[in-house]
Image (cartoon, rainbow, N blue to C red):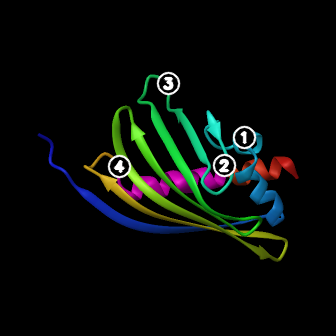
């Protein structure tokens, strides 16, 4: 039997984008826009209680399943969702994410806070934070292309 563990962690990442809050919000709330910088969803219901579900991964690598439920949405200001992440048949984490959008001179400050539980050593906070930073950088590139 494998040794079980639960590692709890919170990280906060801030980015300032040269885009209005409604454009940054649309990048999260519109399935076509989101597919330009995040794994394309098989199911996408952007509403409180709605679900976002996607599967994917590197060629010849494991399949990762992202399964989220939207808990709170304030247009152009805040998105809160909970999600599980599975690698193959193995649950590797459970998280709550808050995205806050704040007006900033010339753009929008995005504050991304994730509170996660990383299970049985299959993932860890440092890897998740690094992956999230890369994801938010990809979002920045997508927003620049729209401008």
| Mark carried by residue 36 | 1
Tell me which residue sits at (42%, 28%) in the image: 61
For discs 1 and 3, the disc positioned in front in the rendered view: 1
| Span of residues in magenta | 123-138
Tell me which residue sits at (48%, 61%) in the image: 96
Q: Give whichever of discs 4 and 3 has the lower sequence position.
A: 3
Q: CA distance from mark 1 to mark 3?
A: 19 Å
Camera-side residue of 10 and 84: 84
Q: Give whichever of discs 1 and 4 has the lower sequence position.
A: 1
Q: Give whichever of discs 3 and 2 has the lower sequence position.
A: 3
**Vertically, is 12 above or below 86?**
below
Q: CA distance from mark 4 to mark 3?
A: 19 Å
Residue 38 percent location from the top left of the image: 63, 43
Counting other residues with Cα less than 10 Å from the Cα at mark 1, is it few (<14), some (14-19), or many (20 or more)? some
Residue 34: image quadrant is: top right
What residue sits right under mark 2 in the picture?
Answer: 138
Q: CA distance from mark 1 to mark 2?
A: 9 Å
Camera-side residue of 95 and 37: 95
Please report contact status of discs 2 and 4: CB closer than 8 Å, yes or no.
Answer: no
Residue 29 percent location from the top left of the image: 73, 52
Q: CA distance from mark 1 to mark 4?
A: 25 Å
| Mark carried by residue 123 | 4
For discs 2 and 4, the disc positioned in front in the rendered view: 4
Q: Is disc 1 placed on a helix, strand or loop?
A: loop
Please report contact status of discs 1 and 3: CB closer than 8 Å, yes or no.
Answer: no
Tell me which residue sits at (35%, 54%) in the image: 124
Residue 7 percent location from the top left of the image: 29, 61
Would you say residue 70 is visible in this rendering?
yes
| Mark carried by residue 59 | 3
6 vs 144, left or right, is: left
């Amino acid at each position: 039997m494998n040794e079980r563990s639960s590692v709890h962690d919170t990280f906060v990442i801030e980015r300032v984008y040269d885009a209005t809050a409604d454009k940054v919000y649309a990048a999260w709330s519109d399935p076509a826009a989101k597919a330009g910088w995040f794994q394309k969803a098989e199911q996408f219901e952007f509403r409180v209680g709605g679900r976002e579900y996607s599967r994917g991964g590197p060629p010849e690598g494991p399949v990762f399943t992202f399964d989220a439920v939207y808990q709170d949405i304030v247009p152009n200001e805040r998105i809160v969702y909970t999600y599980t992440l599975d690698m193959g048949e193995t649950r590797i984490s459970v998280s709550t994410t808050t995205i806050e959008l704040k007006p900033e001179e010339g753009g929008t400050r995005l504050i991304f806070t994730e509170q996660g539980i990383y299970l049985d050593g299959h993932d860890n906070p440092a890897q998740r934070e690094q992956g999230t930073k890369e994801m938010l950088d990809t979002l920045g590139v997508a927003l620049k292309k729209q401008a």
